[in-house]
Image (tube, helix red, strand yellow):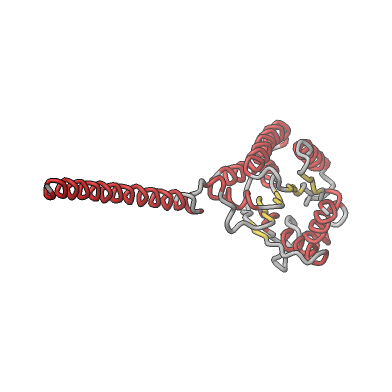
Amino acid sequence: MFKKVVWPLVSMSALILALVFVFGFVTSIIISGDEAGVQTETQTESPEDMPEDVMPPDGASDILILGDSIGFGVGDEENLGIGERYLNLLEEDSETDTTITNSSVPGFESSQLADLIESRENRTSIAGAELIILSIGGNDLNRLNLEDNVTLAPAFEETLNTYKENLTFILSEIRSINPDAQLAIIGLYNPYSEDDPQNARFLLDWNHETRLIVNSDAAFAYIPTYELFAYHLDAYLSQDDFHPNGMGYQVIAETLFRILN
């Protein structure tokens, strides 16, 4: 009788222990899987895996200069150009640590600058800049000197229209990348004799059309140079009689500083 009662109890206890063991084993597997899932989710949010459009710019400068030989600083005996001279004025006015990048290319026309801005490799420098200084258009206009007097007027209109299209595109591209940056464009001066009224008229028309495009953007400043250089060519031009010398670049930088600050 004793055996008939004990053995069923032993068998029942063994079955219960077996069920507890199996339940504990399965539970441990589920918990381990959840922990692995948490770790995987954490790893996918690391900066390396974030989308490119939400990553902060790396290596960008506060000031970016884009354009041609005048943007580059050709003719400046001290190799400072507009950007470095403007930076010196900023440092005199405040103690902020400002950085500058000059991506200007001597000889560039507006179409080449448009291509440069459109390329993805320049998007980071544009996106991170607080101030973007443009110097463009002089080479577009200067090539008209190769035209004869008969074709000069229609060639000017064609060149001006192409320049306006390129400048509008440049502005649109910059704003799509960096909607908040302050922009500034250096107007054209006349490096030639004032005895040629036709050249003077072309320059004034060119600057006027540039101003109209600049006025379409509230954070776009036009920096006039025509009047600055008109009666000071001997003092402001370098030995090539075309590009500014150090004094010429300094007066442009001071005008830029006065308008922006």
Residue 79: percent from left, percent from top: 69, 66
**Which quadrant holds the C terminus?**
bottom right
Residue appearing at x 72%, y 67% in the figure: 77
Answer whether residue 202 is visible to the viewer in this image. Answer: no
Q: Is residue 173 above or below residue 107?
A: above
Residue appearing at x 78%, y 36% in the figure: 212
As drawn, which residue projects farthest toward the bottom?
78
As drawn, which residue projects farthest toward the right?
231
Residue appearing at x 37%, y 50% in the figure: 31
Task: Decide which of 2, 8 is in the foreground and name it.
Answer: 2
Residue 119: percent from left, percent from top: 54, 45
Residue 16: percent from left, percent from top: 24, 47
- In the image, taking residue 256 as reference, residue 20 lies left or right, namely left
Residue appearing at x 81%, y 40% in the figure: 204
Task: Decide which of 92, 192 is in the foreground and name it.
Answer: 92
- In the image, taking residue 79 as reference, residue 8 lies left or right, namely left
Answer whether residue 235 is visible to the viewer in this image. Answer: yes
Task: Decide which of 227, 129 is in the foreground and name it.
Answer: 129
Residue 114: percent from left, percent from top: 61, 42
Task: Decide which of 6, 197 is in the foreground and name it.
Answer: 6
Q: Is residue 175 above or below residue 64?
A: above
